[in-house]
Amino acid sequence: MTQDQLPESPRSVLTDLSGSPPKLDPDTMALLDSFFKEKAEEERRFAEIAAERAALAAARADEMKPIISPEEFRLAFGEQWQLSQFWYSDAFAERLASALNGLCEPSTKIAFLCCPTAFVGFQHFHPHANAMLMEYDERFAVLSPQQFVHYDLNEPDVFPEDLRESFDIIVADPPYLNEKTNVKLKTTVDQIIKPATGKLVMITSTIVEKIIQNLYGESPIGHLKRTAIEVEHANQLGNDFAVWGSWDGAEDFGKQ
């Protein structure tokens, strides 16, 4: 996930103010203390996950084992606001994983573009050997190194050649709610999805519905249909989100 360049922070301005530095009030100090404790706990959990996954890789176990749960993921991987990261709720991650599993056969190849919580939920509840996470944030490589591909939206044509026209299903959640981001994402999707038979699952805000409908109104993806599944984020967002699918009957995707 990327990755549009952020404006540089203004340089600090030094002044000649004299006197002792201001002291923080007790409430602010308590908030800072809580923040640093949470960050320390997050780093501890991340280190544990990295060590566990490294041990599994070293053992070269052939069996596909479930990865951490969405809840464990949220505790170990803090949202990076500069990358527009917002994790799904545990309940939605599980519902989405179940709905996606209903589309899969053992041989299905499924890619998760810019949606790590969806990948974690799917691989926790329904471990799949042919699942791939394509992400900008390289922290997620520790989850399953062999199933991680570094992906930069600013370079939409850059990906391993063996992924070209290879995916039966692509799950995408564009990090930024604008046309520029969606155009870049579509550039990649068009190249890695299987022509004619591939399915796209698009998770994004309803405020860009016209943009995605215009972009995906033609082949190889086709018209997007709003599905039955409702999106939930762990931290409530101001924008309304939804899920769209590209195949006939996608309206029933996620129906209880």
Image: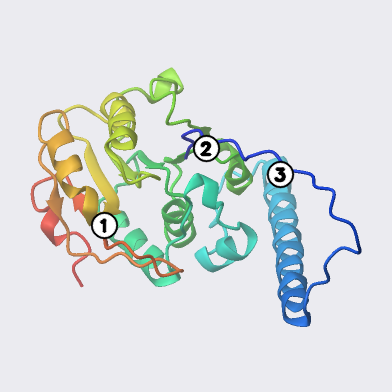
Amino acid marked by disc 3: Ala
Residue 216 in sight here: no
Q: Earlier in the sequence, mark 1 or mark 2?
A: 2
Determine crowd level at label 1: few under 14, some 14-19, many 20+ residues with C-alpha closer than 10 A: few
In this view of the protein, which residue sits in the foreground, 163 or 92?
92
Label 1 belongs to which residue? 102
Report how far apart the C-alphas of labels 1 and 3 lie in the structure: 31 Å
Residue 68, position as x, y percentages in the image: 57, 60
Q: Relative to residue 236, is residue 120 drawn left or right?
A: right
Q: In the image shown, does 44 or 236 lie closer to the viewer?
A: 236
Residue found at x 69% / y 62%? 42
Q: Local crowd at mark 2 within 10 Å, few (<14), some, or many (≥20)?
A: few
Helix, strand or loop at disc 3? Answer: helix
Q: At 35% across and 67% down in the image, what residue appears? A: 232
The label on residue 6 is 2
Is there CB contact under 8 Å for labels 1 and 3? no
In the rendered image, the vertical position of residue 154 relative to residue 222, given as above or below: above
Count of residue discs: 3
Callout 3 crowding tier (Cα within 10 Å): few <14, some 14–19, many ≥20? few
Is 18 situated above or below 176?
below
- Image quarter where the C terminus lies is bottom left
Percent position of residue 193, x then y: 28, 31
Residue 247 placed where, x, y %?
13, 45
Going by the numbered disc 2, the residue's amino acid type is: Leu
Residue where numbered disc 3 is placed: 59
State which mark lies toward you, 3 or 2. Answer: 2
**Is 240 rendered above or below residue 51?**
below
